[in-house]
Image (tube, grey):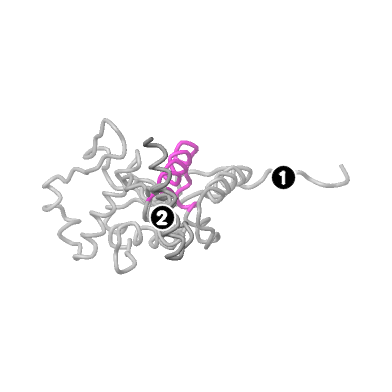
Amino acid sequence: MNGKIKTKKPLRPIMQYLTIKNWKKFQHYRDRNPPWIKLHNEILTSHDWISFDDNAKLLAIVCMIIASKDIDGRIPADEKYIQEVSRLKKTPDFKPLIESGFLVGGVIEHKEETKKEEYKDYFEVFWKHYPRKQGKGEALKAWKVIRPNRDLVVKMLRAIKTQSASADWQKDNGQFIPHPATWLRAQRWEDEPTKVAVYAEPIPRPAILDMPDITEEQRLENMRRLKELTSTMGR
């Protein structure tokens, strides 16, 4: 044994989420990821809503929209991610929503350290297929926030394949392809397919344009030969 004691690898928190209070009571969907959310009118008379300032009210609606994509009504506890996804001008402040109890925070799950490699491998698959190889570190941070499972990774790769053929991504040698971190944070794999770039076959150059120039003397000689040939054929 050489005096060494084997210890188990410590568990580490995977992702901190915030959960909307009473989400399952008010939001029931037959299929997940709906294009809309329910807003009950009692929210306008609730103590939480009345006590919120305008910024907190807007953030509450944003949180509900983002939470509709998760079966348990969760959102990542990442202000930068929420800001970019919801196109907010300022970094959101979760504090009023947490203090009021509208959002409930906590570490949802732990995984053994060995799981780290699994998600890293998925990220490398994404990175291999994404056409713009810039900002890998930021892309990995965004990836860890999303923590996509295998099915979502497949959906991402299909979206990348479709979008890579679009007119926007083909334009100006890919100048308008989003940075990978931006693509991930904005959940661009959910975008509706856009027009695919179509390149027409080049029109063949008319052969007459490649004929060498002739002098006036050669032109008259050709006319004389053509006349003789026509006379011979008419006999």
In the rendered view, tell whether residue 59 sits above or below residue 33: below
Q: Amino acid at mark 2?
A: Trp
Is residue 130 visible to the viewer in this orientation of the structure? yes
Please state if 37 lies on the left or on the right of 203 as rendered.
Answer: left
Name the secondary structure under disc 2: helix
Q: Residue at x 41, y 55 (%)?
A: 169
Residue appearing at x 48%, y 46% in the figure = 147
Magenta-drawn stretch contains 161: yes
Residue at image x 32%, y 48%? 194
Q: Residue 185, percent across and down?
A: 41, 55
Q: In the rendered view, would you say 220 is above or below 195?
A: below
Which type of secondary structure does the marked residue at label 1 adopt? Answer: loop
Mark drawn on residue 169: 2
Question: Does the magenta portion include 38?
Answer: no
Tell me the quarter of the image containing the N terminus: top right
Residue type marked 1: Thr
Q: Residue at x 11, y 47 (%)?
A: 41
Q: Is residue 205 visible?
A: no
Residue 63: where, in percent of width, then height? 29, 53
Q: Nearer the viewer, residue 202 or 100?
A: 202
Q: Position of residue 154 (x, y in %)?
A: 47, 38
**Which stretch appears magenta?**
143-166
Residue on which the image places disc 1: 7
